[in-house]
Image: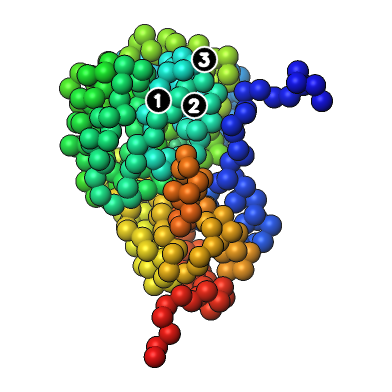
Amino acid sequence: MTDHLTARRTHGFTESVIRAMTRLATEHGAINLAQGFPNFPAPEVVKEAARRAIADDVNQYAITWGARRLRVALAAKYATWYGMDVDPEREITVTCGATEAMASVLLATVDPGDEVIVLEPYYENYGPDAVLCGAQPVFVPLAPAGPIDLDRLAAAFSPRTRAIIVNTPNNPTGRVLSSDELAAIAALCRRFDALAITDEIYEHIVYEGTHRPLATFPEMRERTVTVSGASKTFSVTGWRVGTIVAPAALTDAVRKVHDFLTVGAPAPLQEGVAAGLEQLGPAFYHELAASYRRRRDLLVGGLQAAGFACAPPQGAYYVLADFSALSEEADDAFARRLTAEVGVAPVPGSSFYSRPELGRRLVRFAFCKTDDVLHEAVTRLGALRARLGTDRRPSPS
Ligand code: PLP
């Protein structure tokens, strides 16, 4: 093949390890705690509104930046929840998931060679997103337990910094950044005239503290792009409805990229998400967090009993677990063996790091599953030492 016939832009990409683990789980009939999608139903009001939209022939392209009803519902949500004044006409864009939102925002705002700060471990899509727009990622550690090293963060900023990506509640660590951490990030963004691009897809899945958008910190509204979406809040990851709130000038740029990438998000499903935002009240959001807390406690207890070292996450629906006490294998080999021999699929930790060696002792489990599935996973993990023959506890003398 000549050089002209090879792909160029994807140099430096690997395939998604998360999606590959889903395929492996299917192949082995394993419980899939790898990819973060719920196995329980979406809220009835959300589904009913989407069904009605299809019955009413809402079949054609929605407005490129989102159906007006959904943008108005989003503006009301940001006002009610966070006291943010958002113009639905000029400051909101609806995309095909937070995934497209993040890619569109980066492509619209970052020039090749610009530096973008990423806290790591990080959601694996940010790596390829940076490659696609030619950004130079600068990684700063984010420990699953314990505060961000703010000196190290400050040292990562420079006049070349175009943006920082801030994902809280965080995948994969489960960290919810504190007000002090967010205030420090905001101060650095102001000092270096950098953008904050936030990924707040888990904003309603918080167990400790409360979620506060970075855009609500002083002078941050004008330099923050807030990404979120319906996937996790309404348990509809396959609907592909994401959202962006940004100042008008940035929104103009983002909408152009979004338009040429996808034209728009699915029209009838936007109606479903709008109905959810309009009709679901505090009880729904309270129950969402409470049920995830129950699932978290179930899985974390089971993992600790099975020999993993892990701290309960403060938000989102993942546990990053150290398996050093169970095996000396590398994370990818251990994850494959757990899938094939124990019947529970996690994600290898290295896929969340810029340097694989940083995640070699870690695997990530998702707990967005019904209690029966989690109970069965915990039972299987309980038999792990015997199944793997890797009991590394000292034998009694
Ligand atoms: N951002 C984070 C941090 C995620 O964990 C995920 C999914 O796991 C996404 C974005 C994807 O969101 P969406 O389904 O809206 O594309």
> How busy is the neighbourhood of tag 2: few (under 14 within 10 Å), some, or many (20 plus)?
many
- Specify the color scheme: rainbow
Q: Residue furthest bottom?
A: 397
From the image, tell me which residue sits under label 2: 130
Q: Which mark is nearer the camera, 3 or 1?
A: 1
**Some atom of ligand 1 lies within 8 Å of the CB belonging to the residue at label 1:** no
Mark 2 touching mark 3, by CB under 8 A? no
Q: Position of residue 202 (x, y in %)?
A: 37, 41
Measured in 3D between alpha carbons, the distance from the residue under mark 1 to the one under mark 2, in whole angstroms, is 8 Å
User: Would you say 111 lies left or right of 31 here?
Assistant: left
Residue type at numbered disc 1: Val
Residue sitting at 47 percent across and 69 percent down? Answer: 326
Measured in 3D between alpha carbons, the distance from the residue under mark 3 to the one under mark 1, in whole angstroms, is 19 Å
From the image, tell me which residue sits under label 1: 116
Q: Quadrant of the C terminus?
A: bottom left
Residue type at numbered disc 3: Val
Residue type at numbered disc 2: Ala
Q: Position of residue 126 (x, y in %)?
A: 47, 32
Sequence order check: which comes first, mark 3 or mark 1? 1
Q: Which secondary structure, mark 1?
A: strand
Q: Nearer the viewer, residue 258 or 135?
A: 135
